[in-house]
Amino acid sequence: MPGGFDMFHQGHLNILRAARERCDRLVVGVTSDEALIRMKGRAPVIPLKERCDLVSSLRFVDAVVVDLDQDKRLAWRLQPFDVLFKGDDWKDTPKGAKLEVEMAEVGARVVYLPYTPSTSSTKLRRFIAPEDFSDDEAPAASSEASAIPDEAPAAGAQAPRSAAGEASAAGAVARPLDEGAVR
């Protein structure tokens, strides 16, 4: 389940719970500060370590890894998974269709989960620091669970596979934490 999880809120909690209900093992990829800056053009409010600590403290999250890129095929190549969860605001959109094609290329599928429209990190940031937004910038309708531009609330769970392609108990959306990440 990839996501920025900046300014953790009810939408994040809802989508993580929904993902957990649909998998045996929930691995959450928290997007690095550098990747968020590259993708969003601004740093997250909450630093990576703190975002990882918040997500890993949830009893239904089995593991947290650092997600380095919005191309989830790269994450899959680091450690294969079967399912990537996304908010249903991506369903039937060009970005959702692109993600579905990319995941199909590696044998994974995208499952859409209910999105919480009442709150998002962008809405919170807009309220706290409206000067960060230009007047002509349209209000964000998508959750910032992923905190990735052109990516709505991100959520993904994996039923990871071994190098031989078999289902395994360990898995990740991005590089494992023991490769310099935090938990």
Image: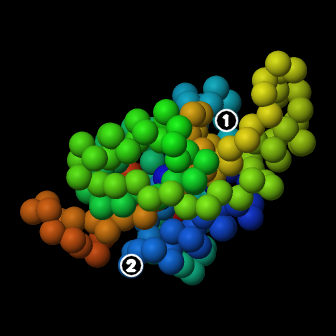
Give the labeled residue for mark 2. Answer: 24
**Residue type, label 2:** Asp
Query: In the figure, 42 relative to 14: above or below?
Result: above
Q: How far across and down, in percent of the image, does residue 76 sit?
A: 30, 50
Q: Secondary structure under badge 1? A: loop
Sequence-first disc among 2 and 1: 2
Evaluate whether residue 170 shows in this view.
yes
| Label ID, residue 43 | 1
Q: For the residue carrying disc 1, how many other residues have a C-alpha within 10 Å: few (<14), some (14-19), or many (20+)?
A: some
With respect to residue 81, does 104 lie above or below?
A: above
Q: Residue at x 40, y 36 (%)?
A: 98
Q: Is residue 38 left or right of residue 8?
A: left
Instruction: Say which element carries label 2.
Output: loop
Q: Where is residue 74 shown, x and y percent of the image?
A: 32, 41
Is 144 or 93 nearer to us in this picture?
A: 93
Which mark is drawn over residue 78? none
Relative placement, left or right, of 80 versus 175 is left
The kind of residue tagged 1 is Ala
Q: Is residue 140 above or below residue 180?
A: above
Disc 2 versus disc 1: nearer the observer = 2
- Which residue is drawn at the image coordinates 75% and 37% (left, top)? 140
